[in-house]
Image: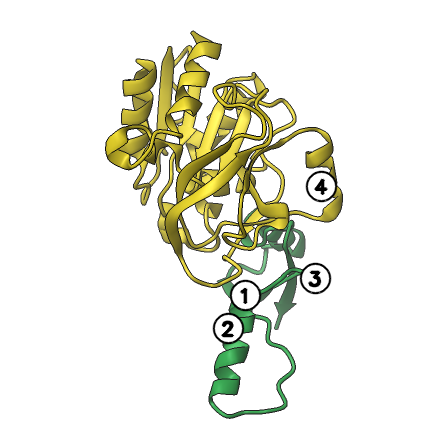
Amino acid sequence: MRAAVIQFPGSNCDRDMAVAIRDITGAETTLVWHRAGDLPDGLDLIAIPGGFSYGDYLRSGAMAARSPVMQAVVKAAERGVPVLGVCNGFQILTEAGLLPGALMRNAGIRFVCRTVGLTVENNRSVFTKGYSTGEHVQIPVAHHDGNYFADSETLDKLEGEGRIAFRYAENVNGSARNIAGVLNAGGNVLGMMPHPERMTEAVHGGSDGRRLFEGLLRQIA
Amino acid sequence: MKTRIFVTLKNGVLDPQGKAIHHAIEGLGFSGVHDVRAGRLIEIEHEPGVSKADLETMCTKLLANMVIENFEIEQA
C-alpha cells in the first residue's frame, strides 16, 4: 500500500496523519508539499491533514484548495483513488469542489476541542468498513469552522444516497443534521471534522479512530 | 483603477459572527438594533483592461464561496 499526505503552509496534523497511516497500515507514506505538480505514482490513499493552511486566510481551506497539488488530487479522486480529508482537510475538499457544502464558523462562535460521540451512518465506504452501521464511537474534534452547511435539497440527496458517513451524537458546532463526515458520489472521497488519527492507541484515550485505517487496509491490500 | 468587492452571506445562512457583534452592540447600551450580518470587503487595484467579467470570475472561483456567499462588484 502507498499513501501520500499533503502538506500546506500551516498544516499541523500532517505528521500525526502520516504516523497513523504508516503504523496501522504499513503503507509507504510520503509527505507531499503543496507546490508539487504531480503526486507519487501508484497511490492507494491520499490524506489531506488538519491544521490552518494559509492561516485560514479568506476562508478556511480556500487558498489551499487552489494550490498546484490539488489539481493532481482532483484528478486522482476522479480516477477513484481514496482521498481522506480531516478537519482542515475536509474544508479544503469542499472548497476544491470534491465534496458538497461548506464549513462555516461554529454556531457557538467558540473553538471546540474535545472528544465527541459519533454515530457511524454508513459502513459501506472504503473508509468505514471497519465499523458497523449505527455504531457509536468516540473521536476528538478541534475546530473553529466545523459547522456543516448545505441547502436542504443537497442534504436530502446526501441522506438518500447514503453519503453521510458520520453524524455527531450531540450538537457540537451547529452542523446541518449533525453531519460530521460526508462522502462524494463515488464513495472514494471522505471529509470529516473529527480526527481519527488522534484516537488510534490506548495512550490517546481510545482507539476508535484506528479502525478507519484498519478498514482501509483491508479494502486496499 | 480600484474595484471594491463586497462578499456577504446569503439570506438564510446563519451568521454566528454577526450575532456575536449584535450582542456586543447591545452590551454597549445601544438599543433598537434588529440584526447584524458581517461580510468582507476586498479592494483590488488593477489595470483598466481587467474586465468586469474577469472580476466576476475571480469572485466565483476564489473570493466568494458560492455555496454560502453572494458578491457585489463596485467600480468607481
Name the residue nearer the viewer: A128 or B73: A128
Q: Which amino acid does label 4 sit on?
A: Thr
Q: Do the residues labelled 4 and 2 touch (CB within 8 Å)?
A: no
Q: How crowded is mark 2: few (under 14 residues within 10 Å), some or many (20 or more)?
A: some
Chain on which label 3 sits: B
Report the residue at 43% width, 19% height from top. Answer: A45
In the depicted view, which residue is nearer to us: A147 or A200? A200
The residue type indicated by label 3 comes to: Gly
Rendered residue at 50%/29% (across/down): A71
The label shown at residue B16 is 1
The residue indicated by pointer 3 is B12
The answer to whether residue B44 is above or below residue A12 is below
> Looking at the image, which residue is at 40% across and 12% down?
A41
Q: Name the residue under label 2.
A: B20
Q: Given contact means CB atoms under 8 Å apart, are the residues at marks 3 and 2 in contact?
A: no
- Chain B painted colour: green
Q: Is mark 4 on a helix, strand or loop?
A: helix
Q: Colour of chain A?
A: yellow
Looking at this view, is A130 or A53 the one in front? A130
C-alpha distance separating marks 2 and 1 = 6 Å
Label 1 sits on a secondary structure element that is helix
Query: Whole-Å distance between the Cαs marked 3 and 4?
Result: 15 Å
Q: What residue type is labelled 1?
A: Pro
Q: Do residues under tags 1 and 3 come within 8 Å of each other at their CB atoms?
A: no
